[in-house]
Amino acid sequence: MPTVSYQGEEIECEKGAVLRDVLNEAGLSVYNGRSAQFNCRGMGSCGTCAVKVDGEVSEPELKEKARLWFPPHHPSHDVRLACQTRVEGDVEVTKGRGLFGQHV
C-alpha cells in the first residue's frame, strides 16, 4: 500500500486513490484560508487544492493541465491539483502559501 506523507502525518491508501480524498478521509485539508469553504469539491475547476507532490502519481490529464494554465497558476509552478491526482506509490505532499497554495 502506498503511503502519503503530509504535514507530519503518514497515511496509507489504496493504489489509484485520489489524493484529495485520501487527505480528507484522514482529516487533513489541502486548502488555505477561505478556500476550505469555497472550492469546487473535487471537480478540478477552481485550482485551490494545488500542492507540490514528490513521488509516484498519475500523469496530469487534460482537465488538470488546462486549469493549471490559468492564474494564479502556471505550468512552471510545478504543482498538481490534489483532486485530480491519483496516488500510485509513496508520495510526499507540500501545500504552499497563498489562497491557491501556489507559492511552494
Image (cartoon, grey):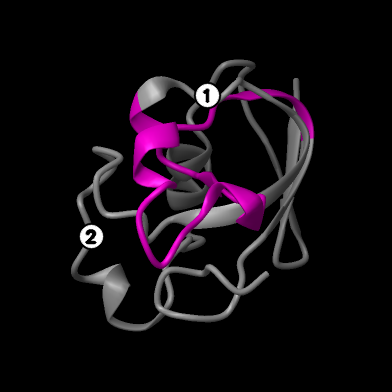
Q: Residue at x 46, y 63 (%)?
A: 29
- The CA span between labels 2 and 1 is 20 Å
Residue 17 is tagged as: 1
Amino acid residing under circle 2:
Asn
Is residue 17 positioned above or below 31 on the image? above
Which of the two discs, 2 and 1, labels the residue nearer the N terminus?
Answer: 1
Amino acid residing under circle 1:
Ala
The question of residue 17 being in magenta is answered with no
x, y percentage for residue 61?
Answer: 45, 21
> Foreground: 54 or 6?
54
> Foreground: 36 or 103?
103
x, y percentage for residue 3?
Answer: 76, 35
Tell me if 72 is positioned left or right of 44 in this view: right
Nearer the observer, disc 2 or disc 1? Answer: 2
x, y percentage for residue 96?
Answer: 61, 72
Is residue 35 positioned above or below 82 on the image? below
| Secondary structure under the numbered disc 1 in the rendered image | loop
x, y percentage for residue 58?
Answer: 61, 20
Q: Residue at x 75, y 20 (%)?
A: 1
Q: How many marks?
A: 2
Q: Looking at the rendering, in which quadrant would you find the C terminus?
A: bottom right
Tell me which segment is drawn in magenta: 63-90
Badge 1: how crowded within 10 Å, few (<14), some, or many (20+)?
A: some
Tell me if 100 is positioned left or right of 58 in this view: left
> Foreground: 47 or 77?
77
Provide the residue designation for mark 2.
Answer: 39
The question of residue 74 being in magenta is answered with yes
